[in-house]
Amino acid sequence: MQKVWFVTGSSRGLGRNFVEAALARGDKVAATARNSASLRALAGTYGDAVLPLEMDVTDRATVFESVKRAKEHFGRLDVIVNNAGYAQVGAVEELTEQELRDQLETNLFGAVWVVQAALPYLREQRSGHIIQLSSAAGVIAMPLGGAYHASKWALEGLNEALAGEVAAFGVKVTIIEPGGFATRDGNNPDPLANGYMAKPDPAYDGLRQRLGAMTGKMPAGDPAAAAQALLKLVDSANPPVRVLFGMGFHPLIERAYADRLKTWADWQDLSIEAHGNLEAR
């Protein structure tokens, strides 16, 4: 059945590939970007099947108006893709208050506004699929990515809770956790080179150099292949709440979870001690 999509961050990268894959197979898409000029080519190619919308996810009122326009234009909404976001890079000590707030405003609050705007329509339909683009960085953390990790870890918890809240309405939620994809001139994205950089403190120069030597070494994923995988995901009758996109991070995540379980087990005696003896009080 033909689906109607609402996709944020449609101007380039994974978001653009998602939009083009959906349109190419005959679906309809409300494609949003901060600058609608970046969407003109889509309208020229796909005509009335695409609704270009200029929208900044941090503007709650505009988000609600855009979702309403998409619903009224196409008559329904089936797939909501929260893709807009960016990576703020810097040691926690280096981050300014504004940099941290801006990161959360876009990556976290922007996604919340889209969900809140779309959910009344999905509940009324008793159907729909919310796709949240998180990251492997939403599961494991590395130095210099504290702000980005904070936004993605928050999204992971928020959407897991959301999945339990909306299942009874026939609405599905899937958190996609991509690894590195070739979204910039065919190269594996290196956040130390391409992210939003905090003003560097020389105290962390050595760490930056060590991490810079490590990043960008993993083979980059193909955004077009990711888009085809997304089509299979939204067509699935029983999609997962979480799924990794790309290769390379699964072993790292397995190791991270094994380490956490071992640490909790190693310190279980202290955990029990912390609980206290309520009967003795």
Image (cartoon, helix red, strand yellow):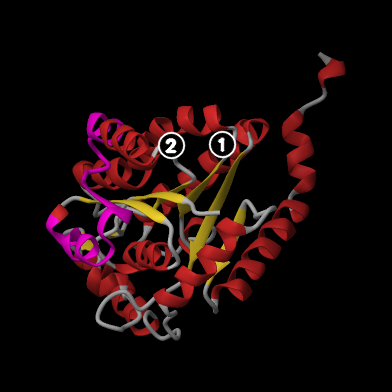
Q: As shown in the figure, which amino acid type bears the numbered disc 2?
A: Val
Residue at the image point whose x is 72% and y is 51% from the top: 264
Q: Which one is nearer the viewer's eye here, 104 or 278?
A: 104
Query: Looking at this view, is 71 or 172 the one in front?
Result: 71
Image disc number at residue 162: 1
Q: Secondary structure at mark 1?
A: helix
The one nearer the camera, 278 or 145, is: 145
- Dominant secondary structure, magenta: helix
User: Residue 228 location in percent, x, y?
Assistant: 50, 71
Q: Position of residue 123 (x, y in %)?
A: 54, 29
Can you tell which quarter of the image residue 127 is in? Answer: top right
Mark 2: secondary structure:
helix
Q: Where in the figure is residue 113, as x and y percent of width and height?
A: 36, 34
Residue for badge 2:
115
Relative to 56, does residue 26 appear above or below in the rendering? Answer: below
Residues at circles 1 and 2 in contact by the CB criterion of under 8 Å: yes
Residue 160 is one of the magenta-drawn residues? no
